[in-house]
Image: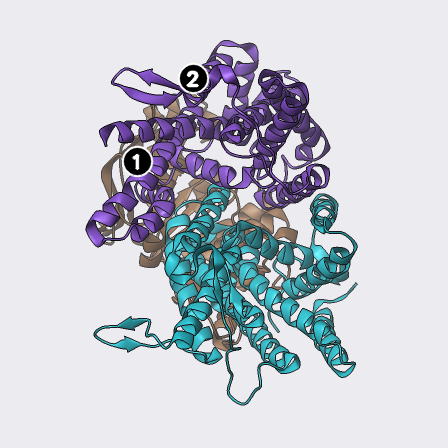
Amino acid sequence: MSLLIAEQFLNGIQLGVMLFLMAAGLTLVFGVMGLINLAHGSLYMVGAFAAAFVAANTGSYLLGIVASVVAAAVAGVLIETLVIRRLYKRDHLDQVLATFALILIFSEGTRMIFGSFPLYLSIPDALGGPITLPGGIEYPLFRLTLIAMGLLVAVGLYLLITKTRVGMQIQAGEADREMISALGVDISKLYTFVFALGAALAGLSGALVGTLQSVEVGMGEPVLIMAFVVIVIGGIGSIQGALVGAVLVGVVQTLGAFLLPIWSKMLFGSPDAGAVLSSMLIYILMAGVLLIRPQGLMGQAA
Amino acid sequence: MISERYLNIAIWVGVLGFALYANFSGETYWVTLATRATIFAIAGIGLNFALGYGGLISFGHAAFFGIGGYAVGILASHAQSFTPIYDGFVTIDGTQSMVIAWGAAVVAGALTALLIGALSLRTSGAYFIMITLAFGQMFYYFAISWPAYGGEDGISIYVRNSFPGLNTLVPFQFFCLVFTVLTIVILLVRTMNKSPFGLALNAVRQMPQRVETVGIAPFKLRLIAFVISGMITALAGAMFADLNRYVSPAMFSWHVSGEIMVFVILGGVARLMGPVIGAATFVAFEEVLGRQSEHWLIYLGLALLIIVLFAKGGIVGSLARRGTARHG
Amino acid sequence: MDKAVLSIRNLSKSFGAIEASKDISLDVRAGEIHALIGPNGAGKSTLIQQIAGGLRPDAGQIVFQGEPVTHLTTVQRARLGLGRSFQVSAVVPDYTVLENIMLALHGRNRTAFRLFSNAFRDTALLAEARRHAERAELGDRLSIPAAALAHGERRLLELAMALSLKPKIFLLDEPMAGLGNDGTQRVTTLLAQLKTEAPILLVEHDMDAVFALADRISVLVYGRVIATGTRDEIRANADVRRAYLGDDEDAL
């Protein structure tokens, strides 16, 4: 039992780091440009489809992953220059509606190209099979790779934001949007870069998670909403908050889905009540955070 | 440009006229379409109360639409199986009466909105959008994972619920019922918008600090507006369940929240009849384009994008000037 | 000595390293205009916000009509009778002058949560709203939206809304900001009348107006009250001259 719990815990971490890839882009785009982007889930989907398509045609999983990042970034640049940049100065209502429209366009567009049937990405042989961890836990190597990649990206983002010129500009943009253009930074290039960066992260996580599950239209939407929960819990605009929130949500979601039905069966003889509760658990967590710290765990007090 | 008042009357007459024409030319399918548009209009009016007047951008109104639908579905399913919903200290039976079931739906919508509103109104702006979206999704998962009421399959209502004095199976009679409800809702919203509450609510959207300074609590105003909004949208959900004789978790889907918002935007935010013309346009769009292409949503997306980017104010906004004088 | 309507006792507030209010104490007594002056950045707005309820002080107390109000919300304080006007006009832009004043009246009468009556049906209330508008010389601008008013008229609407609350004290944050000579003169006349209805805590930059109107003056410099006294006392105060007036005799 405790081995099982440990495995589920690792699954929770794995879900958490993938959520972080999504939430990081969302929160960056919100922090720097003040934009709420519902179409972030579409970029996740674009990444997954690009990976599945390229991997199927070249036989190389690695090329598929590269394709996911490139395709999502290109899609990001495209929608940023065509649509998104017209929205920075608009109110949240316009942003929500326009990006909702983008979801419809992306989803139906993908359906027109690839049809309604799911595609599959198979785990490359080198990463297949389980690995034995200290403590005797058998854990799939691929999932472990996902955790490692997620953490790598987190470190990379940290270095990018704290150590590079672009990172300084991003930080300045988060602090004061007016000031940064006064500093002589080409603001529209910076915005395009930030948006494309977020898109690339979303595309990467779409391809990675799509390998575990399936690649289909609409796959990005549940993830998007979970990423919103992550952001609300972590605090909007905060990358650290996104990381903490993502891991918390990933673990709570995974362990809840595993443990609550078992407990419910022990208590009431049926797993149903536990299953129902576990489906609502992360939202209850979010409600709890709202009650105690409406600005999120890492957010600044209003 | 015409006066908004005349445009409103024209929209009302237009919907009624369309249904009448459809009925007398024997096109019952069109009558059903008009009924569908009318129900969507009510859902949109509900959202418009919070969004248009209160400035509360809720992306979770599917929660209320679904709650209303499930209230009707659950009551009907118990009536169909002759099993009480609750049998303890008191016995609560199911019902196939629209009056009771719709009443229950409105109460359930109010309670749900009170809960969601009390939590999400602690925040504002982008937070509020994300939180309402998340809570809406919570209800979606709840409906899917709750096996007692059909889970993913939903609930079928085998016999159309009844309304005293009407044969609700006749499409035109059901339309008349739904249209009467729409009219009452419009009149109620109009009254509330001109009341002291409406005066304060429209003020809090623009200048909350002023409203506080005159001794009115913005949170309380917004919460009441959100609850009223949830009640109206839940009523629409209840009628939608009766129209389709079926409810499913799809009613809770966030796409429904998005569509309800589209009704409002298409018609015109904070316009009394905006959601009516918006919903009618949406249903017409869906009908005409849906016949042309199974991918009609891509055209809806493009149209929505163009409207948001280039044509603010919606249909009512582009046809009518706003009635400035709120009073006499 | 008249009884204090509002007493501020040892109020302190910091933002990080910046001490915006340092141990501030002052009284506003019945029937007086107590002006608060000080250079930009002295912490006048921060103080007003703490009194009105938008900011919580770190330490100290605000006592209004003998009751501590430090832990009450803005709304609760407004209901007790703190009538505030804003430095940057915060009237409802889409609303007409009459609608703005009616909003204040419904707030004052606690009728703002009536859902099914018409906000403009009560003729007595409408008549009262017109009277308040007329006092602020807006009697002929009733149906003009606030957004379309001239700057000076919007300042007057701020005052009209404050006075229609019939407050027990007025907190007026630079009511003359951006007004020309004529506007300043009109507001000065109005304030002189208003102080007979309720005392006024007046934050103002216009020194002529302050010295014409104020019964007492407090001088705030770097978050600290360096002097409180009558016009003559303040004029004669050496600290005030040094710290605030830069020893410029002509300024007084």
Q: Chain of mark 2?
A: A
Circle 1 residues within 10 Å: few <14, some 14–19, many ≥20: many
| Callout 1: SS | strand
Which quarter of the rendered picture does the N terminus of chain B lie within?
bottom right
Q: Quadrant of residue A229?
A: top left
What residue is shown with label 1?
A: C228
Q: Quadrant of residue C146?
A: bottom right
B176 vs B276, nearest the viewer: B176
Q: Which chain is the one coloured brown?
A: C
In the rendered image of this protein, does residue B30 appear above or below residue A24?
A: below
| Callout 2: SS | helix
Instruction: Say whether residue B15 is visible.
Output: no
Q: Position of residue C165 (x, y in %)?
A: 41, 60
In the rendered image of this protein, does residue C108 appear above or below residue B90?
A: above
Q: Position of residue A195 (x, y in %)?
A: 60, 26
Hey, what amino acid is under mark 1?
Thr
Direction from residue C212 to residue A164 in the image, left or right: right
Which quarter of the rendered picture does the C terminus of chain B lie within?
bottom right
Identify the hue of chain B: cyan
For the point 41% across and 78% down, which residue is it?
Answer: B95
A109 vs B124, nearest the viewer: A109
Hey, what amino acid is under mark 2?
Ala
Q: Chain of mark 1?
A: C
Identify the hue of chain A: purple
Q: Position of residue B81 (x, y in %)?
A: 39, 74
Q: Report the number of discs.
A: 2
Q: Quadrant of residue C15?
A: top left
In the rendered image of this protein, does residue A293 appear above or below residue B322?
A: above
Instruction: Say whether residue A211 is visible.
Output: yes
For the point 74% across and 73% down, which residue is it?
Answer: B14
Rendered image: mark on residue A148: 2
In the rendered image of this protein, does residue B313 appear above or below residue B125?
A: below
